[in-house]
Image (cartoon, rainbow, N blue to C red):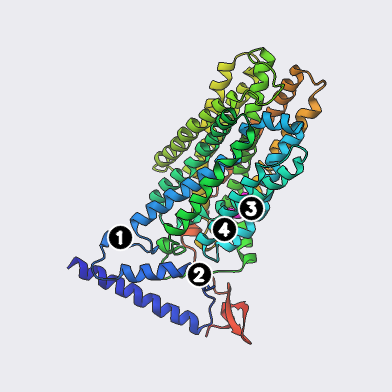
Amino acid sequence: MTWLVINHTAFRQYCWHRTHSSLAVSRGSAPTSDSAPFFSDDSEAEGTEELDGAPGQRPDDLSPSGVSRVRSVLTVSILCYINLLNYMDRFTVAGVLPDIERYFRIDDGKSGLLQTVFICSYMFLAPFFGYLGDRYNRKLIMSVGISFWSLVTLASSYTPKEYFWALLLTRGLVGVGEASYSTIAPTIIADLYVKEKRTQMLSIFYFAIPVGSGLGYIVGSKVDYAAKDWHWALRVTPGLGLIAVVLLLLVVQEPKRGAVEARPEHHLHQTSWVADVKALSKNRSFVLSTFGFTAVAFVTGSLALWAPAFLFRAAVFTGEKSPCVQEPCDTSDSLYFGIITCVTGVLGVASGVEASRRLRKRTPRADPLVCATGLLLSAPFLYLAIVFAQASTIATYVFIFLGETFLSMNWAIVADILLYVVVPTRRSTAEAFQIVLSHLLGDAGSPYLIGVVSDSLRKTDSYLWQFRSLQLSLLLCAFVAVGGGAFFLATALFIEGDRHRAENYAPSDDEPIAVPKSGRTARVPVSSVLI
């Protein structure tokens, strides 16, 4: 009896879908996001839809996304693995930065460019991949991007010492591959899960950011020490990246966009890119949380590149370590900072998600309030860590531990905010613009800015001023964290209304759809073609 009810329900849904699809075609409406035959992400979903309605299929495996429960878990696991590799590769350079500075004979300003060039490339290409991710097969886009990223990373490890510009170029090209992944992966998770389950899966996905960052420092420093050559540190992630591409192609299945949260009375359709941008610019929760996340990016970008070098200079200044006069330099600070980053990342993300879950029972504004609290609490501890570096190494590491734990509370929650205040057909574009804004004003310029300020404050080239100038410039991070907390507090004022509008979104009568005109697609208001 249960089987008959389930199949009767599936049959009614199928008839409704076919009827509305035929009606949409008869009215000349635009196809949904996947119209290109090769790139269409309906190719996999159609087969799953037929399977879901087949006799003998277990009811537990039925999913509106077109992806089974087991395949969904495998998909999230693979996306987490790739996210870990992305951040591991990003911070391997920071883990061997003293060796790179010695090898190329560069100052702090040029060292900061290594991160800035990468972030700028990543940032400017994000909208392009966001546009593609909302319209074409996301699995194929990610596969091509990760393959390119792996090959370019491998090429960067063969840069001669006379060609620092070549290292900058290859690090910039690495951003191409990462942009193709970071804008798209969260939207796939959003199309597989909803509500509490989505938050849980996003928290697992964003665990990979601090853990991968920490592994970048650890693997970079250890491989550098073992091989006596920092170039080998950049040759670890490319091979792992190619494994990720194979897993993507063989295991990951493209889910249907918005199907897990779609309502029969509100059929979502693709609007123009200009309409998407206008809608996002009016979404106050999205804009304010993006500026809050920009502060997170500024602080993490600065610390990610400069914290190990700062700790090393502090040890040289206090006499605990000898200066680096030849390669390989002492990279033990990178190892310790990497371990701290891994641990604090796990604790921070987990505590942020748990605090948000508990606070949601009392207020729907829980998410931005937790983000604001994390940033405001991290600011004093980061300030104390920088100030105490000249007096106590142990106190410095303790304060860094506390500051990074509170800072990491934001990662999964910010992503969840974006996904529930933006409609499914605009999420990749929203991810792309959040990446652009947060990196443009955040970690794209912060490593270079910290380096330039450090160089300008340095009065002499003594070990004292190498440490002191970098110390003073890093103090800026604490004040930026306070500003970010203020933006999240402002987000709390609008979060309820914006979430309600996204959950109850229905295309207005005057939103443009596509109708045939002389054999081509033309954009006209709905009201001018409907009778």
Q: Tell which of 55 and 479 is nearer to you.
A: 55
User: Which amino acid is tagged 3?
Assistant: Val
Mark positioned earlier in the residue sequence (3 or 4): 4
One can see residue 496 in this view: no
User: Which amino acid is tagged 1?
Assistant: Asp
Figure quadrant of residue 272: bottom right
User: Magenta residues?
Assistant: 430-436
| Structural crowding at the residue carrying mark 2, measured as other residues with C-alpha within 10 Å and reported as few (<14), some (14–19) or many (≥20) | some
Q: Secondary structure at mark 3?
A: helix
| Residue underneath mark 2 | 40
What residue sits 56% from the left and 78% below the top? 526
Q: Position of residue 191 (x, y in %)?
A: 44, 58
Mark positioned earlier in the residue sequence (4 or 2): 2
| Residue underneath mark 3 | 176
Mark positioned earlier in the residue sequence (4 or 1): 1
Q: Is residue 261 above or below residue 105?
A: below
Q: Residue furthest bottom?
A: 518
Q: Position of residue 175 (x, y in %)?
A: 64, 49
Q: Nearer the viewer, mark 3 or mark 1?
A: 3
What residue sits 50% from the left and 33% below the top? 342
Q: Main secondary structure of the magenta part?
A: helix
